[in-house]
Image (cartoon, helix red, strand yellow):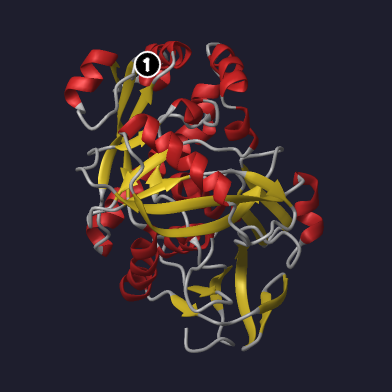
Amino acid sequence: MTGPDAPCDVAIVGAGIVGLAHALACARRGLRVVVVDRDARANGASVRNFGFVTVSGQAEGAMWGRARRSRDIWLELAEAAGIAIHQRGMLTAARRPEAAALVEAFAAGPMGDGCSLLTGREAAARFPQLAPGVSAGLLSPHEIRIEPRDALPRLAAYLAAAFGVTFLWQTAVTAAGPGELLTSRGPIRARRIVVAPGDDSTTLFPDALAPYGLTRCKLQMLRVRPDRPVLPHVLMSDLSLIRYGGFADLPEAAALRSRLEREAGPQLAAGIHLIVAASRDGTCVVGDSHTYDSTPDPFADEAIDRMILAEYAELLGEAPAVVERWTGTYASSAAAPVVVAAPCPEIRVVTVATGAGMSCAFAVAEDVVEELDL
């Protein structure tokens, strides 16, 4: 690959985690790959999330399998690309009795394999950082946490150095068709094209994406600096249990949802659930909220941040100092958690429409590349 007009096997539009996952899947097959992105670096949902590769809690079936495969690939890349694993495992701390019943049901099912169920007393003894009132805990060993703002640049650099993937940054794609991308640097000829548009469903192939009813989910997140040592595992709460399909789809979730509707109406309206993910510098990424609109406003709502921090305080004591705040958006669809559209045999448009790109993108990419018959 000597320039944007030289032929390649696969041209990929978008250098977020979905685009990079497809670049990796193609490069591992020995294919010539070029990745095009309109920004100077990954700057969207892929770097504005927890970096939490979630396995337990993914919906049973395809998503659970994708998460397990993608977690394994992250572990391979951690060594090969120098990507740090900041945490391993997940603790879901159930406060309400209904939440305890739900994690017990999960642990007893097939997706609870390898997970440990803790009584409230056991959770308190093992994790003294927790505030009083935890009635049960589910400890999953399957998760990992990376820092996306560090991992995405390292992954791109690894793809370039180890496989010769060409990156064309600050390059806009204006049109795509069989065998060719038109860009602000000129045409790119390619046998196959993968478009990884993130939350942009209008620029390229909007007709192919229209059946999926894509909209945008806006989230608010914070970075905090606790006064006390943080948990060794990523932490989730009662509110998390009704957002993750692996928990929420169980019959026992109905009682918890009913109680939360009575006790936490504003939090549910803002789509708030608690995840606390620690970094090696002693800070934690905390969030998040979920509101939906085709064009979300860019403004953070202080009331939502206060509710997130109050949920933190319920589980970990007094809310810590906030050192950073941000908003993000990702594609969302009620029709499918992963959208793979085929406007023609040589092109696929791929977006993860649940906010689980870090957890499943590598497995999705392997399936798409297999389908493209390269």
The answer to whether 305 is drawn above or below residue 165 in the figure is: above
Mark 1 secondary-structure assignment: helix
Whole-percent x, y for residue 27 in the image: 42, 65
The answer to whether 6 is drawn above or below residue 274 in the figure is: below
Figure quadrant of residue 229 = top left
Residue 366 in sight:
no
| Between 167 and 117, the one nearer to me in the picture | 117
User: Would residue 320 appear left or right of 346 to someone viewing this image?
Assistant: left
The answer to whether 239 is drawn above or below residue 10 in the figure is: above
User: Would residue 135 appear left or right of 344 to someone viewing this image?
Assistant: left
Q: Mark 1 = which residue? A: 107
| Between 147 and 284, the one nearer to me in the picture | 284
Residue at image point 61% right, 66% down: 192
Whole-percent x, y for residue 144 in the image: 31, 43
Residue 43 in sight:
yes
The number of numbered badges drawn on the structure is 1
Residue at image point 56% right, 86% down: 4
Whole-percent x, y for residue 330 in the image: 60, 53
Whole-percent x, y for residue 98 in the image: 48, 12
| Between 183 and 203, the one nearer to me in the picture | 203
Q: Which quadrant holds the C terminus?
A: bottom right
The amino acid beneath tag 1 is Ala
The answer to whether 162 is drawn above or below residue 285 in the figure is: below
| Between 242 and 267, the one nearer to me in the picture | 267
User: Would residue 166 appear left or right of 242 to someone viewing this image?
Assistant: left
Residue at image point 51% right, 75% down: 34
User: Mark 1 Cα within 10 Å, few/some/many (few <14, many 20+)?
Assistant: many
Figure quadrant of residue 110 = top left
Residue at image point 53% right, 55% down: 369
